[in-house]
């Protein structure tokens, strides 16, 4: 998996998380609160920023992921743990030690494959390790 595929995997994962959140009654109700609407707008803007390779997508990602945890802890399970690692920064505070070790190992293997000019399949490697990180 080259860098572009790695990036696209995380963009797709972000879009899947957004879709799951948008389907919740909290966010699909006609009486949606202003806070909820702002949150969804921020999440959608992040997806657009990533798709357009905007320079601010990484910082926006950290903000949106931490907003999920702070404002909607009951919905955190709908956001892939991969995104917490991908955006890093304050998002890392919400990963446990086992998850951090897992992602560090995967990242080392990804960089090693890149150095050696080998293909890297992130999803297959996660499966091989038997670690279904959501």
Image: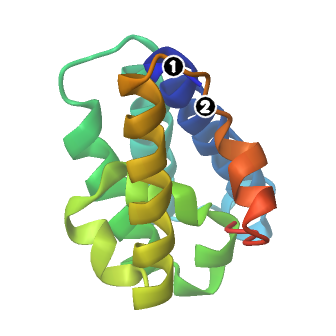
Label 2 environment density (alpha carbons within 10 Å; few <14, some 14–19, many ≥20) = some
Find residue 53 and report its image quarter.
top left
Asked which secondary structure carries label 1, the reply is loop
Q: Nearer the viewer, residue 123 or 11?
A: 123
Tag shown at residue 120:
2
Q: For the point 70% across and 51% down, which residue is it? A: 125
Locate residue 80, reporting x and y percent. Answer: 62, 60
Q: Nearer the viewer, residue 43 or 62?
A: 62
Residue at the spot of label 1:
2
- Most distant residue in the front direction: 116
Mark 2 touching mark 1, by CB under 8 A? yes
Locate residue 54, reporting x and y percent. Answer: 27, 17
Find residue 97 and report its image quarter.
bottom left
Report the quarter where the C terminus lies.
bottom right
Q: Decide: is 96 above or below 24.
A: below
Q: Decide: is 17 above or below 96.
A: above
């Amino acid at each position: 998996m080259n860098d572009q595929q790695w990036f696209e995997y995380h963009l797709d994962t972000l879009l899947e998380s957004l879709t799951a959140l948008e389907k919740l009654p909290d966010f699909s109700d006609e009486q949606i609160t202003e806070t909820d609407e702002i949150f969804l707008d921020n999440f959608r803007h992040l997806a657009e920023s990533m798709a357009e390779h905007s320079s601010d997508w990484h910082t926006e990602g950290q903000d949106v992921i931490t907003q999920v945890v702070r404002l909607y802890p009951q919905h955190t399970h709908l956001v892939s743990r991969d995104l917490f690692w991908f955006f890093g920064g304050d998002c890392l505070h919400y990963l446990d030690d086992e998850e951090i070790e897992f992602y560090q190992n995967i990242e080392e293997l990804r960089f090693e494959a890149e150095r050696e000019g080998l293909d890297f399949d992130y999803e297959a490697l996660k499966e091989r390790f038997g670690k279904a990180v959501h």
